[in-house]
Amino acid sequence: MKIPELIIEEGVEQISQGAFMACRLLTKVTLPSTLKTIEQEAFYKCSHLTDISIPEGLSTLGDEVFFSCDSLRSITLPVSITEIPKGTFLGCKKLETVNLSSELTTIGTDAFIYCENLKSFDFSAYPKLTTLQKDCFSQTGLQRVELPDQINTIEIGVFGKCSKLEHINVPTALTAVPDYFVYKCPVLTEVVMHAGIKTIGRNAFSDCIELEHIDLPNGISEISSGAFLHCKKLQITELPLGLTNIGSYAFSGTSALDSISIPRGVQILGPGAFEESGVRIVELPEGIKTFYDKVFNKCQRLTKVVWPADQKEIPSKTFYQCDTLSTFDIPLGVTEIKSSAFAECKNLYSVSFPETLKKIGWRAFDNCALKEVEIPDSVTEVGNEAFANNKSLRKAFMGRNIVYKNGAKFNFFSQCDSLQLLRIFVSKPIPMSEYDASTCMSYRKKCVLEVPSGCDSIYRATDVWRDFKEIRGVTVGGDTLAAVDFALLKMIYDRLDGKNWTNQWDLSSPDRFEGKWHGVTTDGDHITEIVLYNTELRGEIFAELFTLPTLTRLELTNGELRGSINKVLEGKEQNVSPVLKTIALSCNQLTGDLSPFANSFPALEKLYVDYNQLTAISVPIHSSIRELDYSWQFIDPNTQTPVVSDSCPVVQVALGTPFEPIISTLQTYDHEKQDYSRDNFRKNKIYHYTILDENEPVLMVNPSAFIYDSSIDKFKVGSDQFAKVPRNTPQPFCCTGSPYVPFYFSLDWIDGDVNMDRNVDLIDLQSLIYYCAHESSSSQFPFNYMTGDTNEDKEIDVRDAVVTVNRILDWKGEEPHPSRPYFAAPTVACNVVAIEGNTLRLVNAEEVAGIQLSLQGVSSDELRKASAVSGMKMACRQTEEGLRVLLYSFSGQTLQPGQHDLFVQLPAGTTVSKVILTNLDAKRLDAVVASTLTGLNQISQNEIDRLFADASGDTVLCIYALDGRLLYQGQPHIEHFTSLPKGTYVLRLGNRTYKVTRAK
C-alpha cells in the first residue's frame, strides 16, 4: 500500500493488529486525540516512518507496534503508558531520542534491542522504574549507563552485546548481578559494584575483552559459570571473602590473570574454572568439598601450585597442558591422581609421590619431561600409559603392591625411549606379544630390568622380557616383611585351610613382592590390609587376626569361618589394632553376641557381619561405627532371641497373619558418591529379588561383569561370571563381602520409588520426610533418594514429599491434605480401630511416624466426616482395592511404643484390610491391629458411673488422651477418671472402649 502520509480522523479509538504492517512508503502519521488502543504490530516494518505523534489519551500499546521502523528517530509516549511492551522498538536502528512516561515501571523484553543509534537513556528520569526485562537494551548504542537504586529486577542479557558501552553500575536493590548482564560488551572498562552483592550470574561479564579491573566486594558467595569468561585483560589478585562457589569456566580465558588467592571457605571449584587463564601462582585452601575436572587446564604460564592437604584426589586434566609447570609436590593425604591430570605438561621434570597415594590414572603424566619415577608401595593401581611419552625418563621404580590385572599390557612407559633402568616387583612376567612389546616396551633393549631376587631366571626364559639389556635379581631395603607380620600370615594360612585356597600364598620366605600373598597390602615391612573373599577360608576364627598394630582393614568373607564372635577377643581386648577401621566377616558361620566384639575396636568405622548365625546384640553398638550391616542372621526359628535386621525394607502387614518380611531390595546406592544425573542413572546397575521356580537354582551374577555397550538398552555380561547355586544358599543383602548377587536387572525406575521395590508407598514418603528433615540418609544402607526428586528441581524437599503423597493416592493434581490435632466431633456414626501401643514391637524400640491403611466399605467423604485423624496429617484416595489412607507427619509427630495407642476413628461398618507402618528411619515395624471396636460414642455421666460399678476387680482400666497418650493403667476406680482435668478421653475397660467427656 502506498500511503506516504496518514491522518486518522477524530472518533477512532482503536488501531487493529497489523493495520499498517509493512507500509514501507509511509513517512508521517497523525493520530486522533480519541485513540485509546494501538494493537500488536500496528506499524510493523514501516521502514520509512519518521514522524508520529502519540495522543495523551492512549492507554494500551500492544507488542512490537514499531518493530523494525528503521527511519524513526524520536518517540514520545504519553503518561498513561507505564509499561513498554515486548519488542516495541525492536530494530529501530535510527532511534536516538526516547521520551517515556514519568510513571514508567517496566521496560519489556526486547523493547529496544538492535536500536544501534540509541546512545543514551536517562534512567533517572523514571523514578518508578523497577523492572528491565530480558534483552530490552541488548545490542543498542548505549555508551554509559547509570541505573538508579530503585531498579530491583533485571532479567537476562539486558545490556548484552552493547558494542559501545563503556560504563555501567549495579543498582543497590539487586543482590545478584544478572545472567549475561553485559556479556560481549567489547569496550566496557568500568563496572561499579556495591557491598550488598551476593552472586555474580552466569556469563555476566563474559567476553568483555577491555575490562581490566573490577571491585569484587567481600560477601559475594557465588561466581557463576562463565562469569568472566574470555575477559582477556582482567586482573584480579584476591577473590572476595565469603566466596563458596566458583562456577564452571568462571575465569576461563582470563589471560592477564597473574596470581590468584582463593579464600578459605570456597567449597566448589567448577569444571574449567581457571582454564586457559594466565595465572602463574595458585594457592588452594583446605576445605574445598567439590573439585571438578580441568580447573587449571591449559594454564600455560602456571609455575607454582600449593595443593591443599585435605584434597584427596587430583581430578582429571586439572593441570593438562600447563607447559611451564616444572615441579609438583603432591602432599601427604592425596590418594588418587586421575586420568590426564598432568598430561602434556612438557616441562614437568619432577614430581614427588606421597606414601598415601593409592591410584594413578590413565595417562596421568603422558608426554611430560619426568626424569625419574618412583611409585610408593601404597599404590595398588596404575592406569594404562600413565607415564607414556616421557622422552627424558631415565629411571622408573614400580611399587611393591601394584596389582597387574589379567590381560593387561605393561604399557605404563610406552615410548619412553630413554629409559635405562626399570624395577618391578612381580614374581611372574606379564604376558606380552612381540607386537605389543614393540610399542609398550620399545626401550627394553637399552634398559636394565630389576626384578625380585630369585625371579631373574624366570624373566630370562620368557619371550619379550628376555630382550632387556640386562636382567638383575635385587633385594632392596624394606623388601622383607617384619617377623610378627610374617608370623600372622603363616598362622592364617595354617589355621584357615590355606592349602585348599583358590589363591595360594608363597610362604617360603618373608621377602615381599606383588602376587606373593594374594589380598595382602603392605606398607614398608608391615601389613596394612588383608582382603580375602571367595578364597575358601575354613576354620575357627582367632584373636591374632585383629591384633596386628598396623592393620587398618580386614575382610574375610564368603567362607566357612566358625566360632563365637563374642569370645574370640576374651582377655585380649587391649591388644586389638588401634587403627583397624574396617572389618568384614560376611557370609560365614559365626555365632554369639555381636556387642562385645564390635565395641572392642577404638577406631572401627565399618563393620559387616551379615549372613552369619549371630544370636544377640546385648548392648548398643558404638555410634562411631557409621556403617554396620548385621542383617540376615540364619538362626534356629525356635530361638527366643530376635533376629535384629533393621536394614530390611518396610513391609506390608496383612491383618490376622504372621509378620513376614517381603524381600524387595538387595542392593542400594551410596548417596554421597553416586552420580544421579538422569542420563547417567539409567546406565547404573539396579538389583532386585528374582522370584524363580522353587525347584530351580538361583541365577547369580558378579556385578562387576556388567559392561556398558553403546546404548542404555544393551549390557554385556561375561559368561564365566554366572553361577548357579542351591536356593537355600545365603543371599547377600548388599554385595558386601560377596561378588555374587541374585539379580533382576532394570533399565527404568519409578519416580518416587525411593527404596526401589517398584512401588510408591508409605516407606518412600517417610524416607523423603526424614531426608528433608535430617539432610541425610534414613538408613545405614542409603536408598536411592534422587528418584524422589519428583518435581525434578535437583532438590529433595517437602514439595517432593507432597508430590509423592499425590502419587501414592493416584492424584492428578494438587489437593489439600487436612490435618487435625485431635478427634473432632464426627458427623456420622463412628467406630474406632485401635493399634495398641504395647504391641508395636519395634526392632530398636523406635517410633511410629507413618501409617498407611486400606479400607473397604467407606468413601473418602464419609471418612472426612468421621474426623479420623489423631495427631497426624491425613490424605486419602479411592482405588480399586478400596480407600487408601495415609497418616503421616512432617513435624516429627510419633507414637511411643508402650506409651501410646493409635486410635483411628472410622465410620461404622468400615473394614481394615491392610496396614503399613514405618518409623522415622523408614524401617520395618511389626504391629498387631485390634478388631474394629464398637460403642465408642459419647456416653452420659450415669453410664460412666454404671460402667465403673459393674467392673470387676480384675478388670484393667486404661485412660488415654485423644492424641493416644496413655494417662493411667491399673485398677478400675472411678476416682482415677474424676481426678482428671476437664476434657474428652478414651477409656478402655477390659475389652470395651468408650469416648468420655469430663465436664466438671
Image: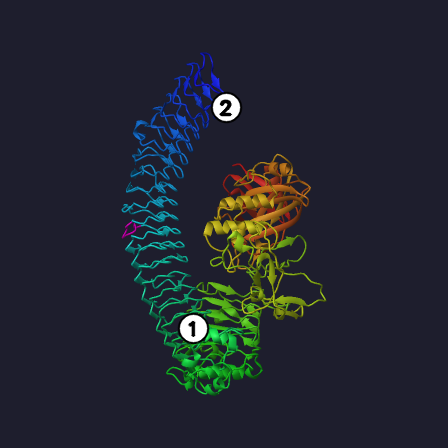
Task: Specify whether residue 239 is painted magenta.
Answer: yes
How many other residues sit within 10 Å of disc 1, few (<14), some (14-19) or many (≥20)?
many
Residue 970, can we see it? no
- The reply, left or right, for residue 694 in relation to residue 416 is right
Residue 426, compared with residue 580, is above or below; it is: below
Q: Of the residues shown, which amino acid type is indicated by label 2?
A: Gln
Q: Secondary structure at mark 1?
A: loop
Where does residue 931 sit, x and y in percent of width and height?
Answer: 66, 48
Residue 400, compared with residue 739, is above or below; it is: below
What residue is shown with label 1? Answer: 413
Where does residue 70 sit, x and y in percent of width and height?
Answer: 40, 28
Q: Which mark is residue 17?
A: 2
| Span highlighted in magenta in the image | 234-241
- Pick the front one: 653 or 16: 16
Q: Earlier in the sequence, mark 2 or mark 1?
A: 2
Residue 944, can we see it? yes
Q: Of the residues shown, which amino acid type is indicated by label 1?
A: Phe
